[in-house]
Image: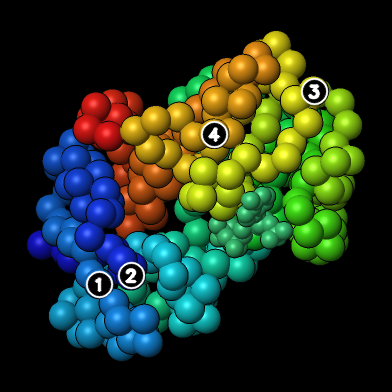
Amino acid sequence: TDKYCVFGNPIAHSKSPEIHAAYAAQTSQQLTYDKRLAPLDGFTAAVHAFIAEGGKGANVTVPFKLEAHKLAGALTMRAQAAGAVNTLLFTEQGIVGDNTDGAGLVNDIVVNAGVPVTGKRVLLLGAGGAARGVVLPLLEHHPAALTIANRTVATAQALVAQFAALSAGAALSACGFADIEGAYDIVINATSASLSSDLPPVPPAVFGPGTLALDMMYGKEPTVFMQFAQQHGAIVRDGLGMLVEQAAEAFAAWRGVRPQTADVLAQLRAKL
Ligand code: ATR
C-alpha cells in the first residue's frame, strides 16, 4: 500500500485525508493518506522522515509551500510559475515539486461552474502567493483580458512583468482597486481579506449580469466578498470546489488516474 500525507501547521482541520480516501475508493487505488503536523522549523526533516518510511508523495499546505518549492530537486512548469509547491512526488530521481492549486481553480470555474475563461475578461484581486499560483493556468485558457488588482500596486505590477512573455495575446495589466475600470465576466478574490472578514475595496461596477465572482476562501456562510458580489448581481462561488479540484489534480499526478469530484464536493458541502 502506497503512502501519502499532507504536511501543514496547523493541520488538524485539513479535509485532504477525507478527499483522497474518497478518490482512492472511487478509483480502486490502494493507498493511505494521513495528515502530519510538521514543526514550524522542521518541515524538511519531516519530509525526509516520511520518505524514509516509504512515502510516495505528499501535499503541502500553510505555511510550508515556499519551503517545499526550495526543497524540490525538480519543479514542474506550473510550480516554477507559482513560486510555490503544494504537491510533492518522491521518485527514484528525487523530489519533484508541483503546484495543482491554479489548475484546480481553473477546472472549478470551467468544468464545475461551466464558465469558459477563453475570450473572457478576468479580474484577479490580490497579488500574493494565492494569486501568483493562478496566473499561468488562467493565461493558458486565453482570456481576452486579465487584470491583476492589488492594494500594493507594485506587487501586481511585478506579477504582470513576470508573466508578460506568457500572456499569449491576453491583455495583461496591473492596477490598484480604485483604478479598476469596466465590468468583468469573472472576478476572483485571491486576497486574504476574507480571513479577517474584510472586503477588498472593489468597485461594484465590476459585477455585471452573469459575472462569476469566486472567493478562494470557504466557510459555512458566504464570505463578505461573496455577499457583496451577489448584492451587485454576480453569481457567486466559494473555494471549496478549488479545494477538491486541486486534490484531484494531485491524485492524478501521483496515480495516473483522474477521479470524479462532484460527489466529494457535495459531501464536503453538506458537512460545512
Ligand atoms: P496568500 O498566500 O493568501 O496569497 P499573501 O501572499 O500574504 O497570502 O498575500 C495576501 C494578499 O491579500 C495580498 O495581495 C494582500 O495585499 P497587499 O499585497 O497589498 O498586502 C491582500 N490583502 C490582505 N488583506 C487585504 C485587505 N484587507 N484588503 C485588500 N487586500 C488584502
In the image, residue 155 sits, relative to residue 140, either above or below, namely below
Q: Callout 3, which amino acid? A: Ala
Instruction: Determine if the C-beta at disc 2 is less than 8 A from ligand 1.
Output: no
Q: Position of residue 42 (x, y in %)?
A: 33, 86
- Residue located at (49% from left, 50% from top): 195
- Residue located at (80% from left, 23% from top): 205
Q: Considering the numbered disc 3 on the image, is that residue within a helix, a strand or a loop? A: helix
> Callout 4: few (<14), some (14-19), or many (20+) C-alpha neighbours within 10 Å?
some
Q: Which numbered disc, 3 or 4, marks the residue that appears first in the sequence? A: 3
Question: Closer to us: mark 2 or mark 4?
Answer: 4
Q: Which mark is residue 37?
A: 1
Which image quarter has ligand 1?
Answer: bottom right
In the image, residue 77 sits, relative to residue 270, either above or below, namely below
Q: Callout 4, which amino acid? A: Val
Q: Which numbered disc, 2 or 4, marks the residue that appears first in the sequence? A: 2
- The residue identified by callout 3 is 205
Tell me how far mark 4 sits from mark 1, CA to CA: 30 Å
Tell whether label 2 touches label 3 (CB within 8 Å).
Answer: no
Q: Nearer the viewer, residue 133 or 169?
A: 133
Q: Which mark is residue 9?
A: 2
Q: Nearer the viewer, residue 246 or 62?
A: 62
Q: Which numbered disc, 3 or 2, marks the residue that appears first in the sequence? A: 2
Tell me how far mark 3 sits from mark 2, CA to CA: 39 Å
Residue furthest to the front in view is 197
- Residue located at (61% from left, 26% from top): 228
- The residue identified by callout 4 is 224
Q: Considering the numbered disc 1 on the image, is that residue within a helix, a strand or a loop? A: strand
Question: Closer to us: mark 1 or mark 3?
Answer: 3
> Callout 2: few (<14), some (14-19), or many (20+) C-alpha neighbours within 10 Å?
some
Using residue 5 as the reference point, say whether residue 118 is left or right of it: right
